[in-house]
Image (tube, rainbow, N blue to C red):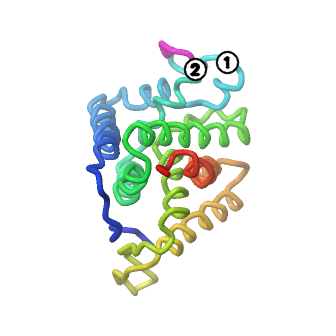
Amino acid sequence: MIPLKDDNPTKIFPIVTIGIIAANILVFIYQLSLGAGYEKFIFTYGAFPYEITHSVDIGPPVQMPVFFTVYSSMFMHGGFMHIIGNMLYLWIFGNNIEDSMGHIRFIFFYLICGTVASLTHIFLAPNSKIPMVGASGAVSGILGAYLLLFPHARILTLVTFGFFIKMIKIPAMVVLGFWIVLQFLNSTVASGSEGGGVAWFAHIGGFFAGLILINFFKKN
């Protein structure tokens, strides 16, 4: 089930959503330009739970307090599918959440959701020496907010099941409900709190942060 677009119009131009997408793409292009230095960049600016819980820099030296890698990591990705998936969800759902609260509030909402997502993973895997990267946690917050504000919005979705492939419009509550259930299932199946390099609990933490925080950030 892959969402492609929604039918939920906006009143304002989503300049922040577009800006965040552009920033992520530019950072990813820079990562690719590093060639053999790609991995070093990830290990320098990715967020290591162990570094943050022990206040120690175990990777290549980073010229800032290690906690701030929580924010640098939000704009980094581990591969093409990683960034494409995150930016697709951000583009589909981010503009309506930005519209609901305005540009400035949306920036803070995005960063706070990303922070809560990272801290959720760090709390559950405090000794992990695998760097977290990606906008997934912050984007998950947007999904939680969208589910609460626009549960009945119609989402054009690519549904695949074996040889069955079809594009249909599905209510947001179904698309996003399926998404969060999938995160819980993956987190349960995964060994500990990180399986296959994916911080599933960060997605869950970000999602519930969005559900809660939207009531404080949306316009009255």
Q: Which amino acid lies under the numbered mark 1 shown in the image of this protein?
A: Ser
The residue closer to the viewer here, 205 or 61, is: 205
The crowding category of the residue bearing disc 1, from other C-alpha atoms within 10 Å (few below 14, some 14 to 19, many at least 20), is few
Residue 53's x, y, as percent? 70, 26
Q: Quadrant of residue 130?
A: top right
Secondary element at image label 1: loop
- Residue drawn at 39 percent across, 49 percent down: 98
| Disc marking residue 190 | none
Q: Which residues are magenta?
A: 62-66
Q: Nearer the viewer, residue 163 or 150?
A: 150
Residue identified by numbered label 2: 66
Is residue 179 found left or right of 82 in the rendered image? right
Q: Is residue 148 left or right of residue 192?
A: left
Residue carrying label 1: 55
Q: Is the Cβ of the residue at disc 1 closer than 8 Å to that at disc 2?
A: yes
- Dot 2 amino acid type: Val
Residue at 43% across, 72% down: 153
Q: Residue at x 48, y 33 (%)?
A: 73
